[in-house]
Every structure is written in structure tokens, then in C-alpha cells.
Image (tube, rainbow, N blue to C red):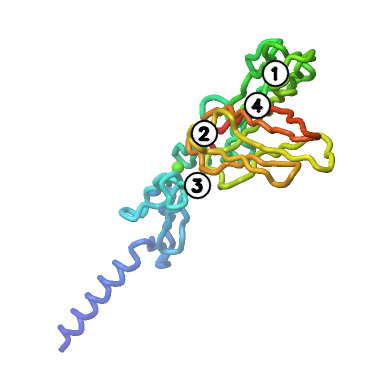
Amino acid sequence: MKLWNVKTHLDLTTAAVLWVSDFHLAGGHREDLNECESNPCSQECANVYGSYQCYCRRGYQLSDVDGITCEDIDECALPTGGHICAYRCNNVPGSFQCTCPSSGYKLASNARNCQDIDECVTETHTCSHNETCFNIQGGFRCLSLECPENYRKSGDNRCERLPCHHNKECQSLPLRITSYHLSFPTNIQVPIDIFRMGPSSVVPGDKIQLSITSGNEEGVFAAKNVNSHSGVVSMQKPITEPRDLLLTVQMQLFRHGTVTAFVAKLSVFVSAQL
Ligand SMILES: [Ca+2]
Ligand SMILES: [Ca+2]
């Protein structure tokens, strides 16, 4: 009976000693041991009564395996990581960095999006003096206007036909050729009207006929009359890859029994959307 009592007492004591293993027994009082002093954690350590807890700085997470090692969080691989950066995500210890294409873009102030560099404003373009710089997403274009024979330049983007002097062949040439420049991101929703054309003044009885005379071999665009004095060019098929297109749009104006042609040269620059 007595023996049994002693054994029970010993077992309890052993258990108690194991349980209080984190305490020093000083002067008969239990004193908490600061485990953090021996740097058990890979980053931060918090001493708590009877134990300690490791924790990690921002950008790291505590290892499930040992509870003491801080592992870098791969922000780029998180389920939401695909959208964390507009272009490319680079994982770095404790953080991540977004990057942009090596040319044409800079990192926006939010450090995630890419912002087009306007080379025409920053004067980093390579256009010559007689060319005009036109900014597009991720790049720029150098434009020059050259008028064909029988035409003279009458503005930055316009050529006027020279007087015909009763030359019938000359009279069938467009009266005016005007250049326009449009820029779009890839994959814009179609159909979408991109250009409207009509005579500068409307005379009762006018009729127009709009048509695309070149540059639409793939049927991406369509021209249609909206009413008797205006028409529109629309994009009918999505453009998925960056490319430059040159469309020639002709408007025939039927007025007072004569027909006059006007031509619009549409440069369509489609650039990648980031
Ligand atoms: Ca990281
Ligand atoms: Ca640009």
C-alpha cells in the first residue's frame, strides 16, 4: 500500500518536471526561461511564459515542418499572383518585383502596372525633322506625308488636288487625300466604329457612297453609309496581334449631278495591351 503511494508520487513528479521543463527552478520558485536568447527562430522570436513562438517578417511565412524557419512567400505563384503584376512578376526574398517590357514602357507609380513611355514627349523617338512622331502603346511611329503627283500639301495631314484645267482624267482623281492615325489595343471588342467621314458642308440632295478601296484584304473592316451625308468605317473582326494597317477609304459625293471623290488614308496601329 505504501509502495504504491510512493510510485504514484514519483510518476506525478516526473510528469510535472517534464511539463515545467521550460522553467528554471530558482530558490524553489519557477522562473520562465527566455528561449529567445538562444536564437531558436530564423527571424523573430517571442518569449511567452513557459514557451516561445517564432514569427516571420512580412513576405515570409513560418515553415509548417519545423515551426522555426521562415520561408519566402512566392507572391508570383499565389492564386492571385497571375494578376499581381501587369506584365511580369519576379519573386525575390521577402517580396516580389514587377517588371515591364525592356523597351517602350516604364513601371507605373503603383509598382505593378506598366505605363507607356510617350517617346514623342520625352523626345526619345528617332524620327527625322521632316517626320511627325506619333505615340502608340509600347512604341511610337514616325509619320511623313508625301503627296502624289498632281497634289500639293495643304496641311500637316492633307493633300489637295491641283487645278485640273478641264482634264477629264484629272477630274476623276480624289479632290483631297487626308491622313488619319488611330491606335488601338489588341482584342478590342468588335464591332466598333472607328472612323466617320462626310462632306465638310451639307447641301440638300447630297448623297455619299463610302467604300474601302485598299488595305482590307482580310475583311477586318467594313464601311457603310449612315445617312445621305455621312458614313462610318467599323472594325468587324478582332485583331489579336500587334500590327500596323493602312486602309484607304473613299467617299464619293454626289452633288448637283457631279461626283467628287475624297480619300482618307487611315493608319491603324494595333498594339499589345498590358
Ligand atoms: Ca517573395
Ligand atoms: Ca509610346
Q: Which residue is mark 2?
A: 99
Gap in angstroms between the C-alphas marked 3 and 1:
36 Å
What type is the residue that disc 4 sits on? Lys
The first of marks 3 and 1 along the sequence is 3
Gap in angstroms between the C-alphas marked 4 and 2:
37 Å
User: Alpha-carbon neighbours of circle 3 within 10 Å: few (<14), some, or many (≥20)?
Assistant: some
Q: Is mark 1 within 8 Å of ligand 2?
A: no
The first of marks 2 and 3 along the sequence is 3
Of discs 3 and 1, which sits in the foreground?
1
Q: Quadrant of the C terminus?
A: top right
Disc 1, SS: strand
Disc 4, SS: strand
264 or 192: nearer the viewer: 264
Q: Which residue is mark 4?
A: 265
Q: Which residue is mark 3?
A: 83
Answer whether labels 4 and 1 touch (C-beta < 8 Å): no
The numbered disc on residue 98 is: none
Vertical order, 146 against 44 (above or below): above
* Residue drawn at the location 45% of the way across and 64% of the way down: 49
Q: Quadrant of the N terminus?
A: bottom left
Residue furthest out toward the bottom: 1
Disc 2, SS: strand
What type is the residue that disc 3 sits on? His
Of discs 4 and 2, which sits in the foreground?
4
Disc 3, SS: helix
* Residue drawn at the location 76% of the way across and 13% of the way down: 152
The numbered disc on residue 132 is: 1
Gap in angstroms between the C-alphas marked 2 and 1:
30 Å
What type is the residue that disc 1 sits on? Thr
Of discs 2 and 1, which sits in the foreground?
1
